[in-house]
Amino acid sequence: MNRDLPASDDSPGAPPDPTLQSTPEASADATYMGLALEQARAAMLQGEVPVGAVVICEGKVVAVGHNCPVGGHDPSAHAEMQALRAAAQALGNYRLPECELYVTLEPCVMCAGAIMHARIKRVVYGAADPKTGACGSVVDLFAEPRLNHHAEVVGGVRRDECVGILQRFFSERRAAARTRRLAAAAEAPDAASDVPPTPIPGQPN
Ligand SMILES: [Zn+2]
């Protein structure tokens, strides 16, 4: 997955954060997204793009997961996939029709497919992903009538925090890359001046 920095949500057309409404469901969504944010922080501590997920069944936490494709040498190790696998194991069923999935970043096509196969009834995400989002940002698979399962989808829950952790991660990574370039230039000024900046995986050049 690319999981690049999502666009700023300060755009005039951005919908309001649903959790700012004070309904019991909005309050539960905010609470569960907090657990997903904890998972995103766990990913960041491991040097992974900070995305976290949690699966809830009838008000109980069934499973959690965080993004770990780099450390796991696994392109499918997105937070949602990790949480779905753990939930299916915990419940002893590959179908999860009573479950809700909370994730800090809009699911990609792969994860949307797994969500459909698992028959997840509701998906709640925080930040939109204009590069790989499959809940409306790039494509909207959950609105595709030719596909046979349609989870309810809610976006923008605790969006600012979900965007903020991604922004912090990429900004720290850019700063570290800059420091490395400066150190290399100080050690070998002639050689370093001929070397273009090292591209960061998952970042636009
Ligand atoms: Zn994904």
Image (cartoon, grey):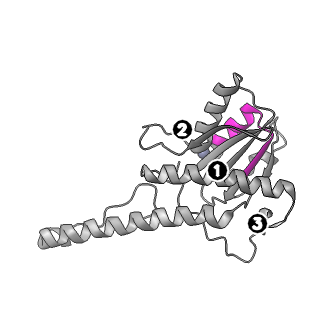
Give the Cα separation between the discs numbered 2 and 3. 29 Å
Q: Which mark is residue 183?
A: none
The mark found on residue 17 in the picture is 3
Q: Residue at 81% x, 48% y: name it.
A: 143
Q: Position of residue 20 (x, y in %)?
A: 79, 67
Q: Earlier in the sequence, mark 1 or mark 3?
A: 3
User: First in sequence: mark 2 or mark 3?
Assistant: 3
Residue type for callout 2: Ser
Q: Is residue 197 left or right of 67 when viewed as pictured?
A: left
Q: In which quadrant of the rendered image does the C terminus lie?
A: bottom left
Q: CA distance from mark 1 to mark 3?
A: 17 Å
Give, as a single range, the part of the protein colored magenta: 111-124
**The disc label shown at residue 76, or none:** 2
Rendered position, 141 above or below 87: below
Q: Secondary structure at mark 1?
A: helix
Q: Is residue 120 magenta?
A: yes
Res. 35 mark: 1
Depth check, front residue: 33 or 196: 33
Within-10-Å neighbours for mark 2: few <14, some 14–19, many 20+: some
Above or below, comparing residue 199 to residue 77 in the picture: below
Between 157 and 127, the one lying in front of the other is 157
Q: Residue at x 14, y 73 (%)?
A: 189
